[in-house]
Amino acid sequence: MAFSDRFLEDLCARNDIVSLVSQYVSLTRRGGNYVGLCPFHNEKTPSFNVSADRQFFHCFGCGAGGDVITFLMRIENLDFPDAVYQLAERAGMTVPENDNEVRVQKQKKDRILSLNRDAARFFHTMLQAEEGKEALAYLAGRGLSPQTIKRFGLGFAPDSWDKLLKQMTAAGYTKQELLDSGLALPNKNGGIYDRFRNRVMFPIFDARGSVIGFGGRVMDGGEPKYLNSPETIVFNKRRNLFALNLAKTSRGERMILAEGYMDVIALHQAGFDCAVASLGTALTQEQARLIARYKSEVVIAYDADNAGVNAANRAIELLKEAGVAVKILRIPGAKDPDEFIKKFGRDKFERLLEASEADLEYRLVQAQGGLNLEEDEGRVEYLKRAVKILCEVSSDIEREIYLTRAAKQAGISAEVLGREVARARKGLISKRKKEQERKDLSPLTAKGSPARELKYQHTKSAVAEENLISLLMARPEFMKQVESRLEKSHFSVPVFGKVYARMKELHSENSAFSLTALTRDCTQEETATLVGIFAKFVGGDTVALEDYLSIILQEQWKIKDIDSETALQEAMAMFRKKKGTGE
């Protein structure tokens, strides 16, 4: 473990989980717990619980769970050391760096972030220099003001194989750090050279304002048009958005999702400072959840070509799953927001924005694509597509409004279309119910844990194991009655055995049974499973303890006998097979 148990225990004690979660989720007190809408999946009824007493969270809807460190890791997309450092800073604590691995990893990240910052300054300086005249003229030609260029830290990568390399090594950075940052590439001779050359540079910031990567754009017809930093120790393009550091503090609950850097910058310059873009890829689930953390509504302002339409349809699904209201912006007379604003001005774009379509309206219009609604064949196909879209709408009011609109478009009565949609919706609900039942009855999930990550081959023992570790978690003093009689090997579920062994270790050290200490060697999924078990436990006494212990020990002998019998049968079957073939 990178950090000592005592330090992590102190860290969690100084970061109250209710206080931290409240920064992201609106919580309401209910008895001894706090409840709210889960930030990790879309729900309308609160199933997300935070225990002030036991200092853990658990969602009864999606199974997510853990301590204050786990929560911060999930909500901010951090790894374990980064979450620890952020919580330490929050609590005013100094992280002990007696562990070499932790220290090296932290120093490496800090060095890469420092290198990225200095590289961004170098690129910005080059833009103002003689070598950057063409790039500066290009940006000015795209309508960007000096203030906008400065605000976004735009720059220029010189048409040189090693200018950045020489500048950064002279500043004290190593060639390996340049490779690790993605700013340099290795050549066949063992040397390295600049990745970005003769490109306008767009620094990419994370939500906290650190430069984590770069995008470079050619100024002519060269390929690739855009070149982004590769994945690095500080840059994950799936978990970040361009200009989020600026858009997250914009007024209102709306965010504009554009397709590229220039669109975003043009929107910000025109006063729409809530614009962001994904980073060279289609919107990801992580990015949709990131948006949902800051805003409740998104207007998708993608290009009007086929690629833009397909990307918009995919983004709609992800954003709705994340619990965000979605609207689609149609951009008449221009291919993108940047071009529209240049042609028609800011005010017309604002009116266009206010008139953006709800996602259902957009999808129904898309359903007409390639069809002639003047012909019966075209109307029938359109109605098939419309039924498929409308049957998925859970809101009766919303479904009724758009059902009536689609019926009118196809020239049939709303009653007839309504019956088709109701029939399709009934079938969809039935199908989903059967799928869920199959999952619930599957050997991989049946009688398993709340998070459905464990397979219980020996149910009676497993349930007793669940109850035993839950009781020991609540009453650590009971370890005295158990530790000499029960070993890790007696558990049929490996993760329970692992946690029990950890309990014995902590008990011998007179350390508390905190969730952080118990799950230090567990995955996030295992931790969520354990929290779900702890959350549903209703308590127990020494009598219950003896019952659980007795069941585990008795079942263990049965399990061993079963395993022995199975092994014997398999050996005999193999013997008979070989004898029959003459081997």
Image (cartoon, rainbow, N blue to C red):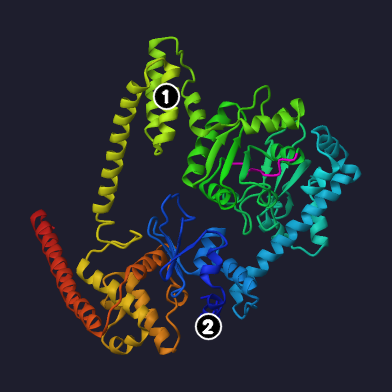
Q: Is residue 148 above or below residue 65?
A: above
Left or right of 286? Residue 392 is left
Determine the residue positioned at 29% across, 48% down.
436
Q: Is residue 456 left or right of residue 48?
A: left
Whether residue 278 can be seen here: no
Locate the C terminus and report the quarter of the image it occupies.
bottom left
Of the two numbered discs 1 and 2 on the same chain, state the one appearing first in sequence. Answer: 2
Q: Amino acid at mark 1?
A: Thr
Q: Taking 144 as reference, is 174 above or below it? A: below
Q: Which residues are magenta?
A: 271-281
Viewer-side label of 1, 2:
1
Give the image location of residue 46, x and y in percent.
42, 56
Q: Residues within 10 Å of mark 2 (few under 14, many from 20)?
A: few
Displayed quadrant of residue 456: bottom left
Residue tagged 2: 6
Of 44 and 476, nearer the camera is 44
Q: Residue at x 63, y 37 (%)?
A: 259
Q: Residues within 10 Å of mark 1 (few under 14, many from 20)?
A: some
Report if residue 550 is visible in the image: yes
Left or right placement of residue 419 versus residue 175 in this view: left
The residue identified by callout 1 is 404
- Residue at 80 percent of width and 43 percent of height: 148
Q: Is residue 275 magenta?
A: yes
